[in-house]
Image (spheres, coloured by chain):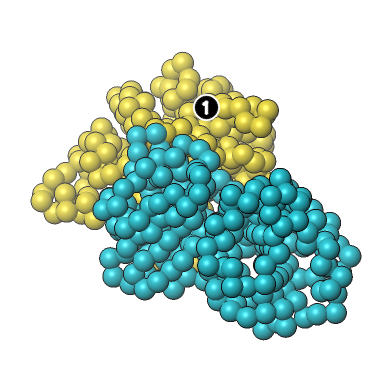
């Protein structure tokens, strides 16, 4: 059973609510509506060693029950994020989880090396499950040997705890998660969007499908990994409201991430934080 | 910026497939700059994401949007009845920037007129409006903009000059070369391409309202980006750095 406030990787977090990577920009944008310090921790959009321009249009498709996105990990590079944003998050007393990715195994490790010691950073989240890029991402995350090598590489260059974000689109997620654990991963983020495809303007577009339906897949992955591995799990996928958040915490998650819900209701995160506070105040635990 | 609960007070078809939706906000609405937009939550089983619409008119507690039914989202929106409630997030994005000029030229292609209505109202004087549409049956989209200096083209030639609006604009371009003028435009991407060609001769200042499919409307998801000529950050978010861009900044 968890406690509130939460302790994760030796640090106290205000609450167990985070955003999912790529759904709150670089962090400052949402402050026109609510303070980033509402979050237990902020998760960056995917950052790489070199700036990356992402995919061409179209990038978004409304599926009616969820969305398909093909952003393609556009970002201005990990160095620029650390230079321009570290102070902002320190001032907001909001720990940062740096979501990182590479197109090669070495690039993942290089991300870890670039961070050095940074007081704002709570953990790294190695994205080994993005369905939107042709190299890296989910291709690496399907192979336990590569997952193990990347985690070992990261652990050898940084003392910052490493979370591994995995996809449930594999034959056996526990096998992949176990490889990450054995290589020294400090936690898991489960799960990412699922790979999908659509055709538009005569072009086939690959993307990641997200939306409330994901929670059923996420909960299964979380349940399976929780039974087999003794490391914290951050739950992500289809969390739309406080009821979903409680469900994930009860399933064994140490913290949760809210993604697509923010696009439907930009106040979804503050509402979930408020709802959880009330839930815990009533003496409930997870 | 606020996520406002609104009640639909009017949602009428202006001309075929074009609707004007007026919604009443609880309390006062925040100030909107011309060109800023809203993200409307559309209540319907087949619609998941919100949809962006430029603010057409803003009064102290009502906001209007003028839209064309193009896909599932706008089709469901067009079925919303008076009294129904929904949510509108706004104001989103950066609007047009208006400086003192001798003359303002506003170019609107079709439903693009919805994007410049608020702008034209705030300019008040010395405005030339170029409006291009497919046929004379669409002229009522101009609403009460008929009090301005109007230049109209229709593709089928049923009113004004036959052809597209940029060809019409080209005929007047030499009159602008010695004037202190600012051009504003709202229309499809192809229109911006030919507008850029037309303006290359004098390279007059021109702001355009750019449209792209969006998920969040506030710079969070990077879904609505457009390529620009900015060497530091070439890929810009339409919802955050836009939707208004300098025509010369866009990589068209």
Q: What percent of the width, then of the height, locates residue B69?
A: 50, 43
Hue of chain B? cyan
Residue B98 picture location, percent across and down: 63, 76
A283 w.r.t. B175: above or below = above
Viewer-nearest residue: A57 or A223: A57
Residue drawn 72% across the image and 57% down it: B160
Place of residue B171 in the rendered image (x, y in percent of width and height, measured from the top left) = 83, 63
Q: Is residue B56 above or below residue A178?
A: below
The yellow one among the chains is A
Dot 1: element: strand
Q: What quarter of the picture does the C terminus of chain A occupy?
A: top left
Q: Is residue B11 left or right of residue B214?
A: left
Q: Quadrant of residue B228?
A: bottom right
Evaluate whether residue A284 shows in this view: yes
Above or below residue A193? Residue A224 is above
- Judge by depth and name the residue closer to the eye, B216 or A173: B216
Q: Quadrant of residue A132?
A: top right
To which residue does mark 1 refer? A195
Answer left or right for B179 relative to A237: right
Dot 1 surroundings within 10 Å: few (below 14), some, or many (20 or more)?
many
């Amino acid at each position: 059973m968890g406690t509130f406030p939460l302790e994760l990787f030796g640090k106290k977090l205000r609450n167990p609510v985070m955003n999912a990577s790529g759904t709150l920009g670089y962090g400052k944008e949402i402050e026109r509506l609510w303070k980033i310090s509402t979050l237990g921790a902020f998760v960056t959009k995917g950052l790489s060693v070199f700036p990356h321009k992402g995919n061409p249009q179209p990038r978004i498709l409304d599926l009616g029950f969820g969305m398909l996105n093909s952003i393609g990990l556009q970002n201005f590079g990990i160095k620029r994020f650390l230079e321009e944003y570290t102070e902002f998050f320190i001032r907001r007393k909001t720990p940062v989880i740096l979501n990182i990715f590479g197109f090669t195994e070495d690039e993942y490790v290089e991300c870890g090396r670039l961070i050095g010691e940074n007081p704002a950073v709570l953990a790294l989240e190695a994205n080994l499950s993005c369905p939107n890029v042709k190299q890296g991402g989910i291709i690496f995350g399907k192979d336990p040997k590569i997952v193990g090598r990347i985690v070992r590489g990261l652990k050898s260059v940084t003392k910052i705890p490493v979370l591994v974000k995995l996809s449930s689109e594999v034959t056996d997620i526990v096998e992949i998660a176990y490889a990450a654990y054995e290589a020294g991963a400090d936690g898991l983020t489960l799960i990412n969007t699922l790979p999908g495809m659509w055709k538009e303007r005569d072009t086939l577009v690959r993307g990641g499908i997200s939306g409330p339906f994901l929670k059923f897949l996420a909960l299964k992955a979380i349940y399976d990994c929780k039974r087999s591995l003794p490391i914290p799990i951050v739950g992500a996928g289809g969390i739309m409201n406080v009821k979903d958040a409680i469900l994930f915490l009860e399933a064994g998650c140490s913290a949760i991430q809210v993604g697509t819900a923010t696009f439907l209701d930009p106040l979804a995160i503050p509402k979930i934080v408020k709802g959880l506070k009330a839930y815990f105040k009533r003496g409930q635990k997870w | 910026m606020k996520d406002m609960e609104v009640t639909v007070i009017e949602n009428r078809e202006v001309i075929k497939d074009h609707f004007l939706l007026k919604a009443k906000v609880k309390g006062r609405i925040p100030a909107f700059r011309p060109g800023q937009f809203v993200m409307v939550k559309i209540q319907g089983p087949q619609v998941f994401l919100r949809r962006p619409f430029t603010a057409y008119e803003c009064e102290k507690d009502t906001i209007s949007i003028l839209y064309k039914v193009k896909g599932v989202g706008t089709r469901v929106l067009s079925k919303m009845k008076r009294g129904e409630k929904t949510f509108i997030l706004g104001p989103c994005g950066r609007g047009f920037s208006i400086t003192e000029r001798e003359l303002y030229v506003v170019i609107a292609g079709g439903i693009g007129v919805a994007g410049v209505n608020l702008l034209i109202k705030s300019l008040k004087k010395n405005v030339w409006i170029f409006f291009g549409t497919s046929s004379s049956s669409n002229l009522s989209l101009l609403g009460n903009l008929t009090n301005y200096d109007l230049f109209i083209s229709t593709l089928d030639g049923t009113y004004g000059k036959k052809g597209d609006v940029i060809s019409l604009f080209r005929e007047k371009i030499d009159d602008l070369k010695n004037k202190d003028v600012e051009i504003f435009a709202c229309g499809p991407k192809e229109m911006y391409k030919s507008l850029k060609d037309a303006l290359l001769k004098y390279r007059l200042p021109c702001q355009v309202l750019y449209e792209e499919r969006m998920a969040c409307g506030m710079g969070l998801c990077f879904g609505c980006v457009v390529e620009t000529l900015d060497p530091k950050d070439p890929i810009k978010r339409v919802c955050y750095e836009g939707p208004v861009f300098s025509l010369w900044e866009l990589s068209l």
